[in-house]
Amino acid sequence: MPHPNLTTDRPTFVTHLECSMTGERYDADRLHGLSRVGRPLLVRYDLDAVRANLPRPMLDGRPTDLWRWRELLPVRHTASIVSLGEIETPLVPIPASGGANVLVKDEGRLPTGSFKARGLVMAVAMARELGVTRIAMPTNGNAGAALAAYASRCGIETIILAPAETPEVNIREIAAQGARVYRVNGQIDECGAIVGRGAAEGRWFDFSTLKEPYRIEGKKTMGLELAAQLGWRLPAAIFYPTGGGTGLIGMWKAFDELERLGWIGPERPRMYAVQASGCAPIVRAFEEGTEHAERWEDAHTVAAGIRVPKAVGDFLILRAVRESGGKALAVGDPAILAATDECARRDGLLMCPEGGATLAAYKAALRTGEVDEDEQVVLFNCATGLKYPLPPAGEPLDKDGPIDLATL
């Protein structure tokens, strides 16, 4: 039976788009990339009208998927929605590996197995609404898989460029879901430069992180969901794996919108942007006190999703981290792998390396007194661990020979 959140026409409240750096206004309902000064555009809403039209009990009565939040999303027309079943993801306690007050928001339960589904479902729905027929995008893996799935579902042609070291499973799932995928001998920003050249020649629309306004609106639903799941009170701290940083920026935007709706107060979580020590441009910029991050050379980490040498939204990530009283933290690959292993063995939750990085960063922050074990903390696991190479396992057992059951 069709889902009411997907089939019911609902009022929309987008007023305009706004340059994240200058505040310059842009018309809604038209196709835009970056602003005139080359910075991300943010979607703005008439929040007074949202408050008048959407009392919280009405929201509470809806099924709890991503499309529950229609009045706070940019899609105007119900027919533009494209969906593969974007559920509200659970908050999973990890008492053995994390502690009594640690929850993992497990984004691996979403379509295509990662939180990239949130941003790409919204961006593709808006591309469909605004008449886009051909899209190109760089990816470290999971975003490309999500774009391929949603674009194929609504008939949009897709070209995806991935660094040659992208996990093999990601390359294959992108191809399996209908996109043309190319392995590039470079990093994700270098893939993005090729996509940008094609967009400048009019060959396709550029779907790079934050180079269109709508992925951030899908990602902000993480913050909306979190507030609802915790009874409209936010945790003391959020640890978020940060490459392009769209989700961190989006959650910060969501909290502001929820406060203006009167649904939460002014309290905010400390936002911790977690990077790998082999690719930590945001950490370096945070520690140096700068507003923008220089490109990280020779980027390398097992956590492919956060291997982003330069982020177009760097100043927005840093702004949210600083305004919240949080920090940008780097953890090494050995700590990432150890945390991932411990969470799986002791709590039964198979996190991706990027999710493992948040647990490793939390443990490091506990040791330095940055967080207290009595504080409620949410870690983001951004994808299912099943997408990543697992160590060899399984000893042979001969059914026809003698078996010493005591040794099994």
Image (spheres, grey):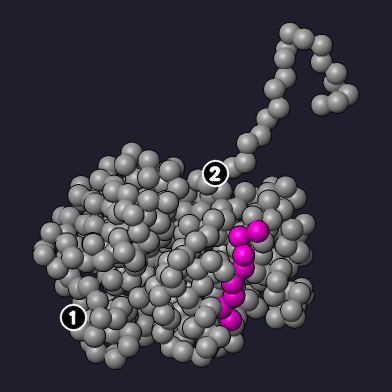
Q: What span is in magenta?
A: 327-334
Numbered tag placed on residue 258 in the rendering: none
Which residue is at 56% across, 53% downward? 352
- Where residue 168 appears, as percent x and y from the top left, is 43, 43
Numbered tag placed on residue 389 in the rendering: 2
Label 2, residues with CA under 10 Å away: few <14, some 14-19, many ≥20 = few
Query: What kind of secondary structure does the magenta stretch mostly adopt?
Result: strand
Which residue is at 85% across, 21% downward? 405
In this image, 225 relative to 46: left or right?
right
**To which quarter of the image does residue 302 belong?**
bottom right
Residue in the foreground of this view, choosing between 40 and 263: 40
- Where residue 2 appears, as percent x and y from the top left, is 35, 46
Where does label 1 land, which residue? 27
Residue in the foreground of this view, choosing between 114 and 36: 36
* Secondary element at image label 1: loop
Residue 57 lies in magenta, yes or no? no
Q: Name the amino acid, label 1.
A: Asp
Report whether residue 335 is seen: yes
**First in sequence: mark 1 vs mark 2:** 1
**To which quarter of the image does residue 135 belong?**
bottom left
Q: Name the amino acid, label 2.
A: Pro
In this image, 310 relative to 251: left or right?
left
